Amino acid sequence: TLTLGVVVVFTVACLKSPAFSFFSFFFFFSFQIIKSLGYSRLVLQIGRGKVVPEPFSTESFALDVYRYKDSLEEDLQKADLVISHAGAGSCLETLEKRKPLVVVVNEKLMNNHQLELAKQLYKDGHLFYCTCSTLPGLLQSMDLSTLKCFPPGQPEKFSAFLDKVVGLQK
C-alpha cells in the first residue's frame, strides 16, 4: 500500500492562536482536506505550541505529534508534502530534498523577509505560499505537478569566494 504523508515542520502562528475555537476549526478543516487529497499520515512539529493535538492511528490515517527533534531528516525523507514556515533554512532544507513545499508566511513579522523569500521562490516555481487563513483554500487548489525542482547548491563556488575574500586565494 502507498502511504502518503504530510509533514508540518514548524509552529505556525495560527497553531499558537489563543482562540482555541479558531485553531480547532483551522486544524479540523485542514486535516479533512489533507485526508481528502489521499494522504494517510500527518506529522506535526508543534514546538512550544500551547495546543497539543492528540496523536492517533486508525486503519486509514495516522497523526503523529512532537515538539522538537534533533533532526528532521527522517521526516523530510518520508514526506510527500511539507508545510512549513517561510524561514530560509526550512525552505532550502526541504527544497534541496526535492519535496513539494507549502510555506505559511508569518504576517506579523516586521520587514517581512519571509514573505519576500516565499514570493520569489513561488515566482520561480519552487513552492506555494499562503497565510494561516488561506492555507485550507491553497491545499484544495494547489497543483503540485506544476512545481519545479530547486537547483542544487554549489558550495564549492561559495567556498572559493570566501577563500578569496579572506585572502586565502588570489
Image (cartoon, rainbow, N blue to C red):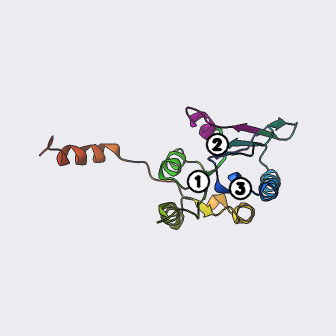
Vertical comparison of 129 with 149: above or below: below
Amino acid at dot 1: His
Q: On the image, numbered disc 2 is attached to which residue?
A: 48
Judging depth in this view, the residue of 12 and 44 nearest the camera is 12
Residue 109: x and y in percent read: 53, 62
Residue 121 on image: x %, y %:
50, 61
Which residue is farthest left? 170
Sequence-wise, which precedes: disc 2 or disc 3? 3
Secondary element at tag 1: strand
Looking at the picture, tell me which residue is in the foreground, 71 or 110.
110
Element under disc 3: loop
Q: Residue beneath label 1, please?
A: 85
The reply to whether dot 1 and dot 2 touch (C-beta < 8 Å) is no
- In this image, 143 relative to 33: left or right? left
Q: CA distance from mark 1 to mark 3?
A: 15 Å
Quarter of the image where one finds residue 21? bottom right
Query: Which segment is the magenta one?
Result: 64-77
Q: Residues within 10 Å of mark 3 (few under 14, many from 20)?
A: some
- Pointer 1 or 3: first along the chain: 3
| Vertical side of 63 occupied by 118: above or below | below
Q: Nearer the viewer, residue 159 or 21?
A: 21
What amino acid type should be assigned to the residue bearing mark 2? Arg
The kind of residue on which mark 3 rests is Ser
Question: CA gap, disc 1 to disc 2?
Answer: 14 Å
The reply to whether the C-beta atoms of the residues labelled 1 and 3 are less than 8 Å apart is no
Labels 1 and 2: the sequence-earlier one: 2
Q: Residue 147 appears at what percent x and percent y?
A: 58, 59
Residue at left 30%, top 43%?
156
Does 129 sit left or right of 14 as displayed? left
Q: Which mark is residue 17?
A: 3
Of the two numbered discs 1 and 3 in the rendering, the one whose residue sits closer to the viewer? 3
